[in-house]
Image (spheres, grey):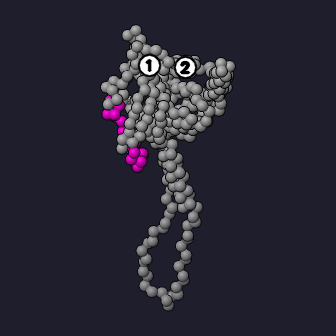
Amino acid sequence: MKIRCCFKFALGMLLAASVASAQGRLLGRVTDADGAPLVAAVVSINGSKTGAVVTNGQGYYTFLGLPEGSYTVRVSKRGLNTRESGVTLAANSTVMLNVKLMSESAPTLAENVAVKDEVKESAARVERRRERPVEKPKPAPKITAAEKEPEKKDAEKPVLVDAPAAATPAMPKADSLADAPTAVALVGKIEDVGLQKAIADAEVTEKISRKVVEKSASVVGGIEAIYKNLQYPPSARNTAREVNVVAKIFVDENGKVIKVDMIKTAAPAFNEEVYRVLTEDTQFTPAEVDSKPTAGVVTIVVNFKP
């Protein structure tokens, strides 16, 4: 009996080690249109694992211990356009995805392409008019003296002349194809010092939930403070049903959200609304050890009612 228990324990440890070795990492940096790092941008993933992290003071974000598979990465910050990109993680791999967020007043990539198509079509129409030959007026028939009648001056007829080609309108400044996020697999040692620190901080964050504290982190104003700003996603109102989401929130010693793990997920629209409210509209009290603030974890249940 004792041998059988030891065998099961050893097998369990072997399986756990195998799963851990197959996990990947997703790293990157979020910047604005000028390349300056964006602090407190929300980077969320939806796939084999669902959750979100908040960019640090240098704009870096890190996801550690991700199961291999395909993910949809969504990056957002209030006042800026949201970007989405697909990423595939292989076993035991590291992928970097840098994202640039543009101002909401700037056209999106789709709008930019639409304007380009319209300009091309307009230019083609002008070119076709220029290539069309102009018909010359036919000479008037000769009239004999007998047939000649008193001269009558015909009103001068206007001659149609093609208008000069219109100037190509200037393209509005917007995110170009070159700005589209591109995932890059990293091989070897990471040289970026800022990224190294972000990874080290993320490893510390992973251990927060195992920390013993005297007082747990909490929501200022209680769960009602969250419901005060929570909105049922407009895109999901056709479902007209109650939806529950369970979120595990990692809070630093200053009461700022640094990470959200979804224990129970819903459709992406509901998950994103939870991330928005937690990171933009909710305040937290940090955990305490020896009456001093420290990083901690709080788990909440969010109930959406149509």
Q: Residue 293's image quarter?
A: top left
Q: Does the magenta stretch include residue 156?
A: no
Q: Where is residue 55 in the image (x, y as percent from the top left)?
A: 48, 26
The residue singled out by tag 1 in the image is: 296
Q: Residue at x 43, y 82 (%)?
A: 151
Check disc 1: other Cα within 10 Å, few if <14, some if 14-19, many if 20+.
many
Q: Residue 179's image quarter?
A: top right
Distance Cα–Cα, label 1 vs label 2:
14 Å
Marks 1/2 in contact by CB < 8 Å: the verdict is no
Question: Is 159 situated above or below 116?
Answer: below
Question: Is 2 situated above or below 50?
Answer: above
220 or 198, nearer to the observer: 220
Q: Which amino acid does label 1 sit on?
A: Gly
Residue 110 at least partly seen: yes
Q: Position of residue 70 (x, y in %)?
A: 59, 37
| Sequence-first disc among 1 and 2 | 2
Q: Position of residue 218 (x, y in %)?
A: 37, 22
Q: Position of residue 240 (x, y in %)?
A: 39, 47
The residue singled out by tag 2 in the image is: 203
What secondary structure is marked by label 1? strand
Q: Which amino acid does label 2 sit on?
A: Glu
**Range of the magenta residues?**
225-241
Q: Residue furthest top?
A: 290
Q: Does the magenta stretch include residue 236?
A: yes
- Tell me the quarter of the image containing the C terminus: top left
